[in-house]
Image (cartoon, rainbow, N blue to C red):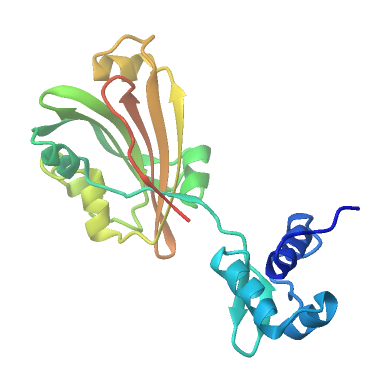
Amino acid sequence: MAKDERPAYEQVKGWIRQHIASGEWKPGDVVPSEASLMERFAISRMTANRALRELATEGLVTRVQGSGTRVAELHRISSQLVIRDIHEEVAERGHVHSTRVITVAQEKAGSEVAEALGLRKGARVFHTVLVHLENGVPIQYEDRYVNPQAAPGYLDTDFGSTSPTLHLLQHAPLTEASYSIEACLPSAEEAKALDIRASEPCLAMMRRTVSGANVASIARQIYPGTRYSFNGQFQA
């Protein structure tokens, strides 16, 4: 077996990496102390300290005074979606936003809507269907249900000047949100409202917002694929 020619501190780092990579040492597990490493590898405290210090810098371990060294928790990469008012978004591009109102109504919740909003079937809900335009061109079809407990004045909104998102941000402060985005073909109604062919690919965002103890709203937003793109940030 060939002799390991690496510096002693690199040998120690390699040994610790191997235990972490194999899964034998899991996030939060204690890593051998400097004294243990000195004995195992017949090295000085300075060498043991350098190995652990460099592993900490690389993010593989964490060192806390008085608690020793532990395998670092795994970093999660998450998409950060900013909830924005579409009027503001269009204005930032130097364009004019306008809204075409299709439906503003109070309805009884069907089973699917009731479950999503955390209400009983048949409970009162607010329903709006709007088309948002940029310089007169439709860019979003928005079908939204709102929980009256979260935003009791929702239906009184002038949706020609105030978007549903802005109203909810002002009256039902956001505490949590979830969303999914997928490719789809528009329904006949959506295609007609967006002035596109039924065969034109679209992006569909399904979004659910929570305000305090209440689910505030659920929305299905359809964007023509050739007219809109989503932007976000990724953070570790």
From the viewer's perspective, is 184 left or right of 192? right
When the figure is inspected, residue 70 is found, relative to residue 133, above or below; the finding is: below
User: Tag count in the figure?
Assistant: 0
Q: Is residue 67 left or right of 125 when viewed as pictured?
A: right
- Residue toward you, 85 or 72: 72
Q: Which residue is drawn at the image coordinates 15% and 28% (left, top)? A: 134
Q: Is residue 195 left or right of residue 230?
A: left
Which image quadrant for residue 60? bottom right
**Where does the image place residue 56, in percent across and percent down from the top left?**
59, 70
Front residue (pair 212, 183): 183
Answer above or below: position of 219 versus 198. Answer: below
Q: Tell me which corner region of the image, top left, top right, bottom left or bottom right, holds residue 194.
A: top left
Instruction: Identify the residue at image location x=62%, y=75%.
Output: 50
**Measured from the top left, where is residue 123 in percent x and y?**
44, 48
Q: Residue at x 25, y 19 (%)?
A: 193
Asked if residue 61 lies left or right of residue 92, the reply is: right
Q: Position of residue 224 (x, y in %)?
A: 31, 21
Q: Is residue 76 placed above or below 179 in the rendered structure? A: below
